[in-house]
Every structure is written in structure tokens, then in C-alpha cells.
Amino acid sequence: MRKILSRLAFAACIAAGVLLAPAAIAEQQPLAPPKAYKPVSIKLPQSVSDPSFEAFRQQLSGIAGKKDRAALARLVAATFFWIPDEHDVADKNKSPIDNLAKAIGLDGRDPPGWETLAGYASETTADPIHDPQRAGVICGPGEPAFEDTAFEELVKATNTDPSEWGYPVKDGVEVRSGFEPTSPVSEKLGLHLVRAYPDDSPTGAVHGDVLRIVTPSGKLGYIAVDALLPLATDQLCYIKEGNAWKIAGVLGGGTPGQ
């Protein structure tokens, strides 16, 4: 399993010039200089085809907007799990909603977890979980498909960290030559892995909505910060019990010991 981090954290850290290592925030090392690289093709995550899942997501979005914990509790499966790394740390002596609250941050004053939940509710993609003990469980957002060996070779060839790489939200993302939205389009991204190259200069700090990247040609360019997604993120998992969807668990999430 690739290390997970939230999409919001990925965007914020990359935009701020901070790179996240797979296990934790790593001691910052000088970035390898930009260089040309062989594109590694990706297949975008697939949306869930079940129409009832769309209705469930809308229900979840409404609950998040109202911060209705009681309504949310009714949508959490009794078998709720929380796997931040390799093992299920859900406290079986606590209710499923209490475990979910701890996993995504619904406790305390002005908790951020409701925004996190709204983000999950907006995601249309999900993948089946690779766990035979949890048949029927899907987790979203989905992850892009690509060859792991090719990615390992890419990281080695460019002397980069895996956390420096993401993928475009769609085919044809425009790359501009400067920070401004009116800057000329220099090229367009295909469906392949893309290297983020944070700009921690004062100018870069002002343009937090723009992300500097390295294109396969080795040139620097700029795209909207939300046009590049992390290779793996925290995921909310779901299961259909009869005709009703429930929240089955969380992959990633908060710190269990806190």
C-alpha cells in the first residue's frame, strides 16, 4: 500500500514548497534539478456506476453541511474499521460513530472533519478494497492505475522522492509559462505521472493557487494547484447492506494515539 495523505494536505504542502515523504514529513533535502523524463502512463480512477451511490453521496454531503452527527451515526456500519497503516485500530469498545469521529476529526471545537467528510462526499470514484475479509467494500477516492516498476524506475532516473509525483485530473491540462492565468500555454499534459516542483520564492508564495511542475521535456511550467492529484490519499470506505450504503471504514485518517 502506498502511503496515504489527504488531497487537501497534498495540495497545501506542494503549494507551500513542502514535500511529504511516504511515512512522515521527511527532513527536507535539496530538490533534484529539473530534467526530462519518460512519461509513465496512468489510467484515471473510475466512477462508481451504481446510481444509488450518487444518492448516498448527496445524503452524506447534506449531513456534512449540517454537521449532523446523529444522522451520520445511522450511516456507519457496525463493522466499521480504521486502518491508518497496516492494522485495524478501531476501538471495539466504542461505537462506530466514535471511531469514525476520531479517524477523520469530528471531535473538539470547530472540528475539520466535517469539511473532510464533504470532500469525500464529492468524490465519484472508488476502488474495491484488496482484502478478502471485507468483500464488497469499496474505498474512495479511487487511485490511478500505473505500472509500479515503471514508477520506481522513474523515481530512480530523476533522483526524486515518490511524494514529488502526482497525476493530472484529466487529459489535456494546460501548462502555462508563468504564474498568471493569462500566461501563454506552453503545452498540455497527457495522462501520465507529473513531477511537482515547488516554488518557495516570495512570488510563488503570492500565487498559492498555482503549482510549478516539470514536464516530461524537462521544462518548468505552471498549472492550477488542484489540477494535480496525489498518487494515493486517505480513503473513506463503503459497503452496500441490502439496498442501503453505509460507511464501512477509513484507510488513513488521524493519529490513533491522540
Image: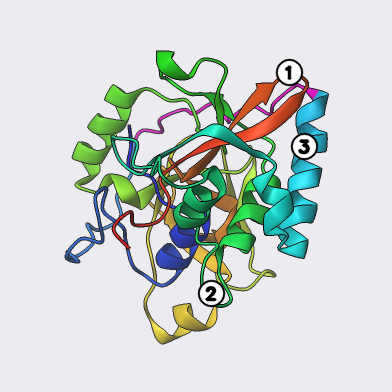
Q: Distance between the residues labelled 3 and 2?
A: 33 Å
Q: Where is residue 37 in the image (x, y as percent from the top left)?
A: 33, 39
| Residue at point 82%, 25% (across, down) | 51
The kind of residue on which mark 2 rests is Gly
The Cα atoms of the two marked residues, 3 and 1, are separated by 13 Å
Q: Toward the viewer: 122 or 109?
A: 109
Q: Where is residue 39 in the image (x, y as percent from the top left)?
A: 41, 33
Q: What element carries label 3?
A: helix
Give me the C-alpha separation between circle 2 and circle 1. 45 Å
Any mark on residue 56, and which? 3
x and y percentages locating residue 70 in the rendered image: 70, 54
Taking the magenta stretch, the answer to whether it contains residue 44 is: yes
Q: Residues within 10 Å of mark 2 (few under 14, many from 20)?
A: some
Seen as rendered, the residue at the extreme bottom is 202
Q: 109 or 74: which is nearer to us?
A: 74
Provide residue 119's location: percent of width, then percent of height. 64, 53
Confirm whether residue 36 shows in the render: yes
The span shown in magenta is 38-50
On the image, which quarter does residue 49 sit in? top right
Determine the secondary structure under disc 2.
loop
The residue wearing badge 2 is: 208
Amino acid type at circle 1 is Gly
Quadrant for the C terminus in the image: bottom left
